[in-house]
Image (spheres, helix red, strand yellow):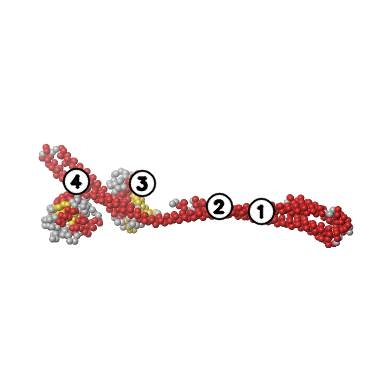
């Protein structure tokens, strides 16, 4: 399972879904809040307008009442001529002026009200003029004239017109109020729609997030379960495979041992009877010599050639071949025996080991004129001493063996611990190894480059087999003519089960 | 071998060539005792224990034993010879084989083998070893077989 599909990072589909859901949710909330704010503002404004309308209406009513009171007072004064009517008239008159001013101010913003308002003012002024005129007639004691004039022009029509105008204004205010009411309810509906939509969106987003998280959690749970199952069986699998490997390895070892062992028996015969043959050829050769000296006529050319050249030559070839075969078989035997040897891990200071090995082959090193340097410090390792000794002495011996024809030979040995492995490097400035042969040289009986040095092609095969047994690996870095570096990578501590 | 001339040598060796080379080299060491050669375990055991002229019935003997036989392992023969109650349990047994496995050597001595010799592959060494064995045989004392 790939990590990217289960980790809720911004790159994964789940992460993207979650982020999109969150953004949508926030946007929905934001829109709902903005709409709510807007709706509140609209509501406030509407309320202001309603109050305004009611004030206009109330002032209008007040003005109408005062106009009626004024007219009633005038009429009373005209009929009775008594003081209280005049007082009432003056009182209404005084109260009317500020009210009219207020009404004017309140309706000033509405062009529809301006014309009726102007009419009201005109009619009020006209009415007032008539009323004051009749009042002053009554004041002067000419009540009859006032009444007479009243009969001619009762002012009834004027008052009626005023009433109508007031009615028009009141209607206009009502109309405005209704208009605003409609506007307000439209706003409220819009607000409701927005809130519902935002709410639905929020619910949807929450649902998507929840489902996504649940799916992710389930996937996580499944992968965790799979992982724990894998973990539980891993050890089992490793044990099983290790056992298989050990079995296969054992099989190969046994095979190598049996083959090499059984090959030895006939070889003993070949070598033994070759020796017998050689020993038997000796008296024959002597016989030919004697015959040649005493009776040359009985010695044929063929017999002489057979005894002096053919037999010794044939025996010689058989001997060199069997000797070589013997060495090869012994090599296989040695490898298989090495594979069966019980390893004994112990603490080994690598620098001391390198020192010991170079000292042990000091005479060879000096003969070949090689400078060997050991770079200190080297780590301490827990491993099998004999195997490690054989590996390093093979590598160091090889490094001193395949020298460059013109360079002074130098061998450098170093070791370091990196990332849980101990790497031992044996570097030389010798003739180098063709990269094509880098794998081959570790195979049994395979060699590389000019065959001018003694050897059977066993050393590195042995080294690799030993390295594997120690839980390590061996590799080489080299170019032809550039020297070679062999890297032995080992676990810092050899565990017996893996050996 | 001691002056008792009738001590026979029983050689159990499946490889004819080896047998021939061993015999030749023993003879070269001056050993003239009778050498009986067997190439498989069954007939060899039969001779050792049951033949009228075999060692169990008549006279002392020593055994040269190879461990790799076609019909049984040499160690089985060794165990039969050396087991408690065997008439031949004191007869010297020389194991002469190509195996130089440590475990195998230990096992043979545990079973009561008297000498364990690995056949050298190099013929000169092989011949040398057999001749030395011959010299050794010429001086060791072989006990009488218990009746």
Compute the Cα span from label 2 to label 1. Answer: 29 Å
Q: Are marks 2 and 1 in contact (CB under 8 Å)?
A: no
- Residues at marks 4 and 1, CA–CA distance in whole angstroms: 126 Å
Looking at the rendered structure, whether the residues under marks 2 and 1 are on a common chain is answered as yes
What separation in Å lies between label 2 and label 4 (alpha carbons)?
Answer: 98 Å
Tag on residue A121?
none
Please give the name of the residue rendered at 19% of the width and 58% of the height, measured from the top-left corner. B80
Task: Report how far apart the C-alphas of labels 3 and 2 lie in the structure.
Answer: 62 Å
Marked residue nearer the N-terminal end (1 or 3): 1
**Label 2 CA crowd tier, 10 Å (few <14, some 14–19, many 20+):** some
Task: Kindly indicate whether the residues beneath marks 4 and 1 are on one polypeptide chain.
Answer: yes
Which residue has dot 4 on it? A274
What number is the disc on residue A184?
1
Residue B113 as seen in the image, left or right of residue A235: left
Residue A341 % position (x, y): 29, 55
Return the residue at label 2: A24
Q: In terms of sequence position, does the residue under pointer 4 or pointer 1 come before the other?
A: 1
Mark 3 crowdedness (10 Å alpha carbons): few <14, some 14-19, many ≥20: many
Marks 4 and 3 in Cβ contact (< 8 Å): no
Q: Are marks 3 and 2 on the same chain?
A: yes
Give the distance between the C-alpha atoms of the residues marked 4 and 3, in whole angstroms.
Answer: 44 Å
**N-term-proximal mark, 4 vs 3:** 4
Front disc: 3 or 2: 2
Q: Provide the residue designation for mark 3.
A: A478
| Secondary structure of the residue carrying numbered label 4 | helix
Give residue A418's position: percent from left, percent from top: 39, 54
Chain of the residue on which disc 3 is drawn: A
Location of the C terminus of chain A by quadrant is bottom left
Disc 4 sits on a residue from what chain? A
Chain under disc 1: A
């Amino acid at each position: 399972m790939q990590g990217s599909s289960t980790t809720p990072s911004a790159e994964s589909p789940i992460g993207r879904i979650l982020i999109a859901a969150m953004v949508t949710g926030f946007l929905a909330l934001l829109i709902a809040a903005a709409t709510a704010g807007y709706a509140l503002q609209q509501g406030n404004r509407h309320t202001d307008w309603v109050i305004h309308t009611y004030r206009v209406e109330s002032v209008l009513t007040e003005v109408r009442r005062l106009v009626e009171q004024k007219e009633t007072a005038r009429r009373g004064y005209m009929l009775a001529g008594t003081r209280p009517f005049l007082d009432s008239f003056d009182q209404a008159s005084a109260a009317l002026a500020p009210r009219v001013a207020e009404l004017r101010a309140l309706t000033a913003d509405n062009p529809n009200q301006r014309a009726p308002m102007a009419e009201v003012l005109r009619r009020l002024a006209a009415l007032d003029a008539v009323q004051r005129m009749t009042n002053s007639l009554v004041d002067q004691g000419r009540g009859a004239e006032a009444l007479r004039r009243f009969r001619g022009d009762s002012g009834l029509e004027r008052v009626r017109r005023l009433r109508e105008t007031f009615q028009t204004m009141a209607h206009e205010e009502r109309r405005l109020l209704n208009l605003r009411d409609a506007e307000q309810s439209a706003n409220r509906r819009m607000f409701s729609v927005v809130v519902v939509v935002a709410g639905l969106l929020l619910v949807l987003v929450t649902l998507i997030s929840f489902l996504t998280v649940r799916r992710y959690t389930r996937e996580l749970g499944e992968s965790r379960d799979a992982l724990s199952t894998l973990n539980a069986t891993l050890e089992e699998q490793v044990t099983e495979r290790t056992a298989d490997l050990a079995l296969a390895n054992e099989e190969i070892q046994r095979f190598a041992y049996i083959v090499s062992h059984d090959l030895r028996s006939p070889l003993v015969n070949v070598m033994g009877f070759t020796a017998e043959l050689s020993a038997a050829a000796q008296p024959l050769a002597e016989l030919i010599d004697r015959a040649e000296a005493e009776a040359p006529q009985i010695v044929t050319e063929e017999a002489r050639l057979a005894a002096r050249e053919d037999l010794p030559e044939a025996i010689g070839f058989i001997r060199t071949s069997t000797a070589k075969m013997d060495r090869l078989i012994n090599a296989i035997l040695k490898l298989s025996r090495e594979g069966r040897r019980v390893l004994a891990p112990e603490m080994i200071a690598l620098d001391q080991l390198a020192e010991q090995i170079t000292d042990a082959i000091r005479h060879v090193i000096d003969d070949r004129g090689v400078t060997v340097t050991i770079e200190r410090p080297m780590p301490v390792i827990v491993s099998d001493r004999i195997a490690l000794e054989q590996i390093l002495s093979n590598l160091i011996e090889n490094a001193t063996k395949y020298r460059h024809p013109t360079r002074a030979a130098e061998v450098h040995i170093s070791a370091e611990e990196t990332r849980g492995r101990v790497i031992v490097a044996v570097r030389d400035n010798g003739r180098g190894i063709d990269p094509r042969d880098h794998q081959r040289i570790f195979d049994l009986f395979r060699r590389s480059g000019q065959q001018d040095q003694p050897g059977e092609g066993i050393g590195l095969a042995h080294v690799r087999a030993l390295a594997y047994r120690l839980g390590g690996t061996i590799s080489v870095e080299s170019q032809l003519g550039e020297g070679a570096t062999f890297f032995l990578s080992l676990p810092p501590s050899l565990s017996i089960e893996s050996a | 071998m001691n002056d008792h001339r009738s001590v026979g040598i029983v050689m159990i060796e499946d490889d004819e060539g080896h047998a021939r080379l061993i015999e030749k080299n023993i003879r070269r060491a001056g050993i003239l005792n009778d050498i009986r050669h067997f190439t498989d375990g069954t007939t060899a055991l039969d001779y050792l224990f049951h033949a009228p002229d075999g060692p169990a019935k008549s006279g002392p003997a020593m055994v040269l034993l190879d461990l790799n036989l076609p019909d049984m392992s040499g160690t089985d023969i060794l165990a039969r010879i050396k087991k408690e109650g065997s008439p031949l349990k004191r007869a010297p047994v020389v194991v002469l084989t190509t195996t130089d496995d440590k475990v195998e050597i230990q096992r043979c001595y545990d079973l009561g083998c008297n000498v364990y010799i690995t056949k050298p592959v190099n013929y000169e060494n092989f011949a040398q070893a057999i001749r030395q064995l011959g010299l050794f045989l010429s001086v060791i004392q072989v006990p009488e077989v218990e009746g």
